[in-house]
Amino acid sequence: METLETNRLMLRSFRLNDADDVYDYAKRDDVGPLAGWRPHGNVDETIIIIKHFIEKDDVYAVILKETNKVIGSLGIHFTTLGSLGEVYELGYVLHPDFHRQGLMTEAVQVALDEFFFVQNKDELYVGHFMENSPSKKLIMKLGFKFIEDINYQSRDYGQKETKIYKLTKLNYVLKKERKK
Ligand SMILES: CC(C)(COP(=O)(O)OP(=O)(O)OC[C@H]1O[C@@H](n2cnc3c(N)ncnc32)[C@H](O)[C@@H]1OP(=O)(O)O)[C@@H](O)C(=O)NCCC(=O)NCCS
């Protein structure tokens, strides 16, 4: 994946030596469960996941430039989403020490620019579990439109009722135009 940059962040491919930074948030019970995966029990579990990210090459490490540490991840996966079939789906998590500073908004925006304008894709989906109001706020702020509720097969917690949203390239362009 191409490295992307914003004012405060760098988004780049994962490296094995990111494991300690990732474990620092992946061990917490207020991160992974909201995205459907169990907190990591030790850094070896984190290394296995990072190897998977490296192999698939569809997840960015989100790095705070000020400290050069990995503080989260952002992935765009080509996956099957219920009756919608095979689609591109956005996912993200951020270390709670850095929540509510506009950082994930910044990360997603640069990833959307790459997805729509460089990779020239037409539409992107995203979902959140019913109780995840921070993620819902972020999704609404980015201009995604609600599509439907589905039973989402989460990684570690079985099926979870999930709200699904879609952003088209056209709506993204229009939203950017309005902000100018
Ligand atoms: C969802 C998540 C990535 C948001 O990241 P973030 O960097 O804190 O989000 P931002 O600061 O860019 O905020 C985006 C919008 O959501 C709002 N928001 C974010 N967290 C909020 C919270 N806890 N309560 C209320 N509003 C919240 C912000 O106010 C902002 O809206 P505004 O600009 O109109 O004020 C982060 O909470 C997270 O990693 N949570 C744990 C993992 C997770 O839930 N992943 C998503 C699975 S679907």
Image (cartoon, grey):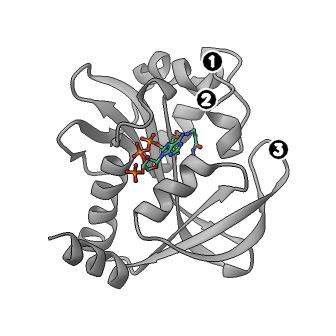
Mark 2, Cα crowd under 10 Å, few <14 / some 14-19 / many 20+, is few
The local secondary structure at tag 1 comes to: helix
In the rendered image, which residue does mark 2 sit on?
48
Q: Earlier in the sequence, mark 3 or mark 1?
A: 1
The local secondary structure at tag 2 comes to: helix
* Label at residue 44: 1
| Contact? badges 3 and 2 (CB < 8 Å) | no
Q: Quadrant of residue 67?
A: top left
* Label at residue 164: none
Q: Earlier in the sequence, mark 3 or mark 2?
A: 2
Residue type of the residue flagged with mark 2: Ile
Where residue 143 sits: x, y (%)? 42, 70
| Contact? badges 3 and 1 (CB < 8 Å) | no
Q: Quadrant of residue 171?
A: bottom left
As rendered, which of 27 and 54 lies closer to the eye?
27
Where residue 134 sits: x, y (%)? 55, 47
Q: Residue at x 65, y 35 (%)?
A: 32
Q: Is residue 161 left or right of residue 120?
A: right
Q: Quadrant of residue 30?
A: top right
In the rendered image, which residue does mark 3 sit on?
157
As rendered, which of 91 and 13 lies closer to the eye?
91
Estimate the spatial distance between the alpha carbons at disc 3 and disc 1, rounded to whole Å. 21 Å
Mark 3, Cα crowd under 10 Å, few <14 / some 14-19 / many 20+, is few
Mark 1, Cα crowd under 10 Å, few <14 / some 14-19 / many 20+, is few
The local secondary structure at tag 3 comes to: loop
Residue type of the residue flagged with mark 3: Tyr
| Contact? badges 2 and 1 (CB < 8 Å) | yes
Q: Is residue 127 left or right of residue 168?
A: right
Looking at the image, residue 143 lies above or below residue 7: below
